[in-house]
């Protein structure tokens, strides 16, 4: 099997499996909110996991909150900030290339009466600074929402330039950053990044599904999305799970080691595939400076879903658009917003890699593409 669909989800690492087994032992399974010694032990473990997670992310423990996924983190950050800070302004700035978790939140806010201003992006998927300045200049911007690495193209946000522009024109604007596809693939440190709120996902870094993290910079106030017993400093109610939090931490530890070495390895795979696919008249849609973990390519003569299923015959797995939108069978809105021709976008396939992929897999992928063209393409 060749798995090139790591932006949708990653396979669970052996270390995470082992950690989950350890944390499900009876002596660790009490409710962390209980007052007896088993509960205190569970809370001690949970609190330690929170501190270690914060340390790896360059944050303070009180800035880290465990959630069920990045979608919950995004909803909490975006809705929670606008709910809590009504005097900060009535406008939110973003782009139309954001993940659905962000776009649906913005649509929710628009229906509630907030003004959503969308910054234009260039052919590389990056926000145009002049468009950003124009939208900021209209005033009353409470929140700006961006994605550090686009999940469909790998386009890397020039965040420092974006941040400086925002702070120069509208210094009080809060910044939310989707860091899901960046974590473990490039250096992400909260203390130096400069974002006010960030979302992360466990199942994108070889943890299990059902765990994520929300970072909220100390001093930023937001309303909680989930109400209840007031766990996690009243930010996210619900019984704390040392198992899920521990699974996230274990995965984070693993992907935090050798980030540069892994990037170089994946970049070699990406470069090889770019070269070989371009030689076969495929169009590379990811920008040249994209994070190498994502490669979006349009196959001449094959609609995206057709190519996906042809590859599946050979036990090779890729995706068309984001997995969150795939079953709707729509052309990628990200590519269309970048100015990609609809016919080209309709043939687009996303290859996404992990540090575990190999050059041998890339070479096998090219061999199978050649076979698919020989067998199925009508000349």
Image: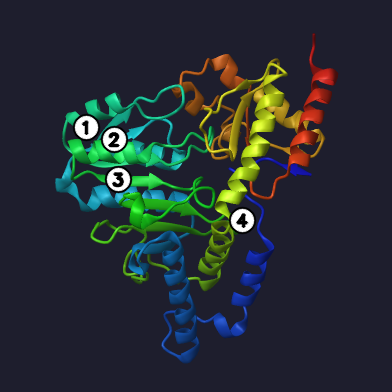
Give the spatial CA distance, label 1 vs label 4: 38 Å
Check the image and report above or below for 125 versus 148: above
- To which residue does mark 1 refer? 136
Residue 93 got which mark? 2
Give the spatial CA distance, label 2 vs label 3: 9 Å
Give the spatial CA distance, label 3 vs label 1: 13 Å
Report helix, strand or loop for mark 4.
loop
Give the spatial CA distance, label 2 vs label 4: 32 Å
Residue 161 horizontal side relative to residue 152, left or right: left
Give the spatial CA distance, label 4 vs label 3: 27 Å
Report helix, strand or loop for mark 3.
strand
Disc 1 crowd rating (10 Å Cα; few below 14, some 14-19, many 20+) is many
User: Tell me, what colour scheme is on the image?
Assistant: rainbow
Identify which residue is drawn at 38% across, 66% down: 237
**Place of residue 63 in the rendered image (x, y in percent of width and height, measured from the top left):** 34, 63
Report helix, strand or loop for mark 2.
strand
């Amino acid at each position: 099997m060749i798995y090139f669909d790591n932006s949708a989800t990653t396979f669970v690492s052996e270390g995470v499996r082992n950690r989950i087994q350890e944390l499900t032992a009876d002596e660790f399974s009490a409710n962390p909110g209980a007052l007896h010694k088993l509960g205190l032990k569970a809370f001690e473990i949970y609190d330690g996991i929170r501190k270690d997670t914060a340390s790896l992310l360059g944050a303070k423990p009180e800035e880290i909150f465990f959630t069920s996924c990045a979608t919950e983190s995004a909803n909490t950050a975006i809705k929670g900030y606008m709910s809590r800070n009504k005097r900060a302004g009535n406008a939110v700035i973003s782009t139309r290339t954001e993940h659905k978790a962000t776009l649906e939140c913005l649509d929710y806010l628009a229906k509630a009466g907030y003004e959503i201003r969308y910054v234009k992006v260039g052919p590389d998927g990056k926000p145009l600074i002049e468009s950003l300045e124009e939208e900021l200049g209209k005033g009353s911007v409470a929140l700006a929402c961006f994605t550090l690495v686009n999940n469909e193209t790998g386009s890397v946000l020039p965040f420092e330039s974006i941040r400086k522009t925002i702070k120069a024109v509208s210094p009080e604007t809060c910044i939310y950053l989707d860091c899901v596809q960046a974590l473990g693939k490039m250096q992400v440190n909260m203390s130096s990044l400069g974002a006010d709120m960030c979302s992360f996902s466990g199942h994108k870094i070889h943890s299990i599904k059902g765990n994520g993290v929300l970072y909220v910079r100390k001093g930023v106030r937001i309303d909680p999305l989930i109400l209840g017993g007031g766990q996690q400093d009243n930010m996210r109610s619900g019984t704390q799970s040392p198992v899920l939090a521990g699974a996230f931490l274990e995965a984070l530890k693993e992907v935090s080691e050798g980030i540069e070495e892994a990037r170089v390895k994946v970049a070699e795979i990406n470069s090889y595939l770019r070269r070989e696919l371009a030689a076969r008249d495929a169009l590379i849609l990811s920008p040249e400076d994209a994070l190498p973990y994502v490669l979006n390519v349009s196959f001449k003569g094959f609609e995206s879903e057709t190519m996906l299923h042809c590859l599946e015959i050979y036990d090779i797995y890729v995706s068309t658009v984001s997995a969150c939108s795939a079953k709707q069978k729509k052309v990628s809105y990200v590519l269309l917003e970048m100015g990609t021709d609809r016919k080209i976008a309709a043939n687009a396939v996303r290859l996404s890699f992990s540090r575990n992929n190999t050059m041998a897999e890339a070479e096998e992928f090219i061999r199978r593409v050649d076979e698919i063209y020989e067998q199925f393409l009508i000349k």
